[in-house]
Image (tube, helix red, strand yellow):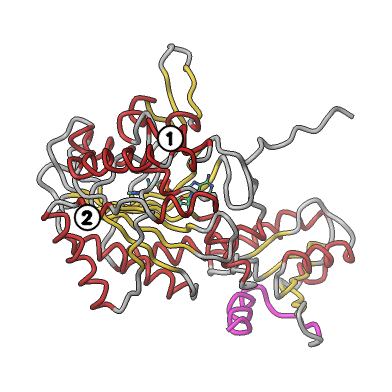
């Protein structure tokens, strides 16, 4: 036998049992997004590399070391998207959706980052990404957060903590950056290797360090909120007002800086302590400069992405199995001669709204009943020569001891639907 080929590290297969939970999450999200008037947009997995370097930022971890980039056959550099925001802005500009318009959009699908795989962190992972364009005030930031809070309620996920922060305007952030670098230089001997590397290129990310030894340095660091311009400060106060009014609890976290360069003003994350190190299940914020940076007119924008693997893990911890639909009926076919009428009968049952799995590949009665049981169907319908002669079928309830009974084929669908409730 030749060697088995395995999946790529950090890229997961989702088997049917697991998919049930995914469907539960996806349909809850779709229902909540519908209820706020967000519309779905579908996008390619591949984009030009330049789209991400110009938006996420050359110096971020994502662009500097995590992208799946390659040259295609024409020598053009392409990248498997590491996130969806840049692609949505690209598509919005390309199709004229953004100019002088308000858009509420969402997108779902796989993203790709060459990170070190561990629980909750994968190289192919899935997001539901939600974006709102054309609205500059804190009301829409609050709406996005309310939407996520509603999703947690619908999914009955509790115990998530909301952290918020404001990164201000790029000018305010630049002033803060200078002060932060001055401060960190003065504590240089306490910085770990990672932070020393970031000091020049991306000093704000040092605040996000997970190394406990770095905690005192971070605690004493200057506070970004003190460097905010007046409008950003008012925006942030406005957001807090909406959240207070809605009864949504939050922590203002000066460590929350996010790993992508496009953010301005509001940033937020929902986290849990139930998933170990990878506890952020949702992250996002405002990015008022990005549309212009990608060639459009200045357009305010704000959004977030849910990390689906992590949310599915939370559902699984609760023992939630999800409900992937199973066939209601399994059609057992007793004799090769009945293959054609059986398939036609199964089609008639489906026409009447039943979910029917038809036995394929022959087999003894016992074998077929075993398959029927494994399919999860409630009923097995047995079609043998006698039933065929009488245009009837035998009904066996696989989930109770009720006696088998024979009914006419034309009445079968109505009878089964009554039984299934
Ligand atoms: P992000 O924080 O990079 O933001 O990712 C959002 C979420 O995706 C994270 O909170 C996490 O749950 C999940 N995630 C990220 N990387 C991985 C991974 N390697 N494995 C599993 N899950 C992961 C963004 O992507 C922004 N585009 C969000 C946004 C939308 N901001 C504004 N609009």
Residue 163, position as x, y percentages in the image:
37, 63
Residue 182, position as x, y percentages in the image:
31, 39
Q: Give the alpha-carbon distance from disc 2 to disc 1, as whole Å.
A: 22 Å
Which residue is the extreme one toward the bottom? 402
Looking at the image, which is closer to me, 181 or 147?
181
Residue located 42% across and 31% down the image: 63
The secondary structure type at the circle numbered 1 is helix
- In the rendered structure, the answer to whether residue 164 lies left or right of residue 136 reads right
- In the rendered structure, the answer to whether residue 196 lies left or right of residue 266 reads right
Residue pointed to by mark 2: 226
Looking at the image, which is closer to me, 351 or 279?
279
Residue located 36% across and 49% down the image: 257
* The magenta segment: 403-421
- In the rendered structure, the answer to whether residue 82 lies left or right of residue 145 reads right
Residue density around tag 2, few if under 14, some if 14–19, many if 20 or more, within 10 Å: few
Residue 44, position as x, y percentages in the image:
40, 36
Residue 132, position as x, y percentages in the image:
24, 53
The secondary structure type at the circle numbered 2 is helix
Q: Earlier in the sequence, mark 2 or mark 1?
A: 1
Residue located 61% across and 81% down the image: 420
Q: Which quadrant of the figure contains the C terminus?
A: bottom right
Residue pointed to by mark 1: 198
Q: Is residue 420 magenta?
A: yes
Mark seen at residue 114:
none
- In the rendered structure, the answer to whether residue 220 lies left or right of residue 223 reads right
Q: Which quadrant of the figure contains the N terminus?
A: top right
Looking at the image, which is closer to me, 264 or 341?
264
């Amino acid at each position: 036998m030749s060697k088995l080929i395995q999946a790529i590290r950090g890229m997961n297969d989702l088997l049917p049992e697991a998919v049930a939970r995914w469907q539960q999450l996806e349909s809850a999200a779709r229902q909540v997004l519908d209820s706020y008037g967000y519309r779905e947009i579908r996008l390619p997995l591949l984009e030009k590399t330049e789209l991400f370097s110009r938006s996420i930022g050359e110096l971020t971890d994502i662009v500097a070391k995590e992208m799946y980039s390659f040259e295609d056959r024409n020598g053009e550099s392409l990248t498997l998207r590491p996130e969806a925001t840049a692609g949505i802005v690209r598509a919005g500009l390309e199709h004229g959706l953004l100019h002088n318009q308000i858009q509420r959009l969402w997108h779902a699908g796989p993203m790709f980052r060459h990170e070190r795989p561990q629980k909750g962190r994968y190289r192919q992972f899935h997001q539901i990404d939600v974006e709102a364009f054309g609205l500059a005030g804190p009301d829409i930031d609050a709406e996005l957060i309310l939407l996520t809070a509603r999703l947690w309620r619908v999914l009955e996920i509790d115990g998530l903590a909301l952290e918020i922060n404001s990164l201000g305007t790029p000018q305010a952030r630049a002033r803060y950056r200078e002060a932060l670098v001055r401060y960190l230089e003065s504590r240089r001997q306490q910085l770990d290797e990672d932070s020393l590397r970031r000091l020049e290129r991306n000093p704000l990310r040092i605040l996000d360090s997970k190394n406990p030894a770095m905690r005192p340095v971070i605690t004493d660091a200057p506070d970004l909120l003190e460097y905010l311009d007046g409008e950003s400060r008012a925006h942030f106060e406005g957001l807090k007002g909406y959240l207070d009014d809605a009864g949504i609890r939050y922590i203002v976290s000066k460590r929350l800086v996010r790993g992508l360069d496009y953010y301005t003003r509001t940033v937020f994350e929902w986290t849990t302590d139930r998933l170990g190190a990878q506890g952020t299940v949702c992250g996002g914020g405002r990015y008022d400069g990005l549309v212009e940076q990608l060639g459009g007119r200045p357009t305010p924008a704000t959004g977030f992405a849910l990390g689906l693997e992590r949310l599915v893990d939370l559902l699984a911890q609760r023992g939630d199995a999800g409900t992937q639909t199973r066939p209601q009926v399994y059609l057992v076919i007793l004799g090769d001669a009945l293959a054609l009428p059986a398939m036609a009968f199964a089609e008639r049952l489906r026409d009447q709204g039943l979910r029917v799995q038809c036995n394929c590949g022959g087999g003894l009665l016992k074998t077929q009943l075993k398959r029927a049981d494994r399919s999860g169907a409630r009923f097995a319908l047995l079609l043998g020569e006698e039933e065929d002669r009488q245009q009837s079928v035998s009904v066996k309830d696989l989930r109770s001891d009720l006696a088998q009974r024979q009914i006419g084929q034309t009445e079968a669908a109505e009878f089964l639907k009554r039984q299934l409730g």
